[in-house]
Amino acid sequence: MPALVLLGAQWGDEGKGKATDLLGGSVDYVVRYQGGNNAGHTVVVGDQKYALHLLPSGILSPTCVPVIGNGVVVDPSVLLSELSGLNERGVDTSKLMISGNAHIITPYNVTVDKVTERFLGKRKIGTTGRGIGPTYADKINRVGIRVQDLYDESILTQKVEAALDVKNQMLTKLYNRRAIAVEQVVEELLTYADKLAPYVADTVLVLNQALEDDKVVLFEGGQGTLLDIDHGTYPFVTSSNPTAGGACTGSGVGPTKISRVIGILKAYTTRVGAGPFPTELFDADGEALRRIGGERGVTTGRDRRCGWFDAVIARYATRVNGLTDFFLTKLDVLTGWEQIPVCVAYEIDGKRVEELPYSQTDFHHAKPVYETLPGWSEDITKAKSFSDLPKNAQAYVKALEEMSGAPISAIGVGPGRDETIEINSFL
């Protein structure tokens, strides 16, 4: 049975939650493999809307086991709050599994994130201030706190002491902040141990055994391809690997077990935070996309920057992820435009460039080269098959598919779970 990777093919916020939830009833496990509560997924079930941050979207499917993999960084207070909120709404969260190797976002990681971003001023990255980057930095610097450390007070104390030896020097001498007490941090972290204990598991073993038993496992990325720490628009990126390779390192499942890689594409383009964005709109069209698409960050609450579809980015995502399929979302948002521009290439220093430039400088100066496609005015939210779409909407989808380099196998025509056209099955 297949192991599927589902990830964002732009800068995130493409609608991964809807796609994961759609597949949730057909898969046995849904795994978050990177990121933290800097991600936000909105899932609409009937008349109910759910905003998920740390939890895999599969948590809403009663037959599915949701898993937080070793590549995720976990803020225990946020996780427990999210679980409590779902339980109050009648969602069963008892099947959740958390890797004992996942790293903990500590209070000092959040503090360091906020003061560092403030200190950068105009050079700030645009982080969510939730401690994600500093936690991954601690992981790489081998002073991180893992979930399993909550169950050995001696080891936990030693690790917190080692981390704060350096951080307190930085906080007091560079940022003029108070030092953080080791005992205070340890005491707070230990309060989460019993509450998290029912969920902690050897998820690497569980997932590999599940695949050996012909179970279907879906790996869900937290952010988009262009936010990848290695392959994104560095330095305006996240601190982990949302691209397909991250699914393997963030879960402990080898690449030979991955059968399909599905990229989620919005029918236009959005971005949250700082960094270059060639097709960004600063006019009435940009404001209309923001308003009609409800483009506000699930986690940050910030308005998303909006622009036309960028086929250069889509081709890049196909290449670096080895995409086998696309799920095109929010096609309905484009209803009403007489003409819809699509970026097919860039102009850089007077030259036409059809692939994403590797140079940060070149990408910063890239100007979009547009082709204009005819729009449509008909309501498409009730469409159940590709043939139900207006001819111009069909042509738009086919053009995006040809430009992007992988087949579009599903189309979102509205926010609801059932407002999806499935062209080819992902399973």
Image: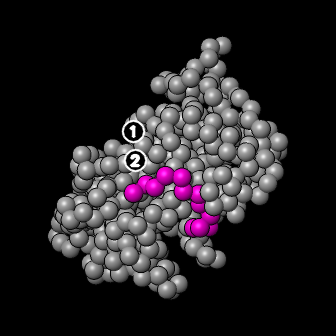
Instruction: In the rendered view, tell whether residue 121 sits above or below residue 216.
Output: above
Tell me what residue is drawn at x 70 percent, y 63 percent: 382
Q: Residue furthest top?
A: 350
Pinpoint residue 314: horizontal percent, then vertical percent.
53, 37
- Residue at 46 percent across and 45 percent down: it is 325
Query: Pointer 2: residues within 10 angstroms few (<14), some, or many (20+)?
Result: many
- Disc 2 marks which residue? 261
Viewer-proximal residue among 92 and 394: 394
Quarter of the figure with the N terminus: bottom left
Which residue corresponds to the image point at 42% horizontal and 41% vertical from the top-left? 323
Q: Is residue 420 magenta?
A: yes
Residue at mark 1: 322
Question: Label 2 sits on what residue type?
Answer: Val
Marks 1 and 2, how far apart at CA: 7 Å
Query: What's drawn in magenta, residue-wise?
Result: 416-427
Taking the image as shown, residue 102 lies to the left or right of residue 202, namely right
**Image location of residue 262, percent across then percent down:** 44, 49
Q: Residue at x 76, y 51 (%)?
A: 335
Q: Are marks 1 and 2 in contact (CB under 8 Å)?
A: yes
Which quadrant would residue 417 be assigned to in this image?
bottom right
Image quarter of residue 416: bottom right
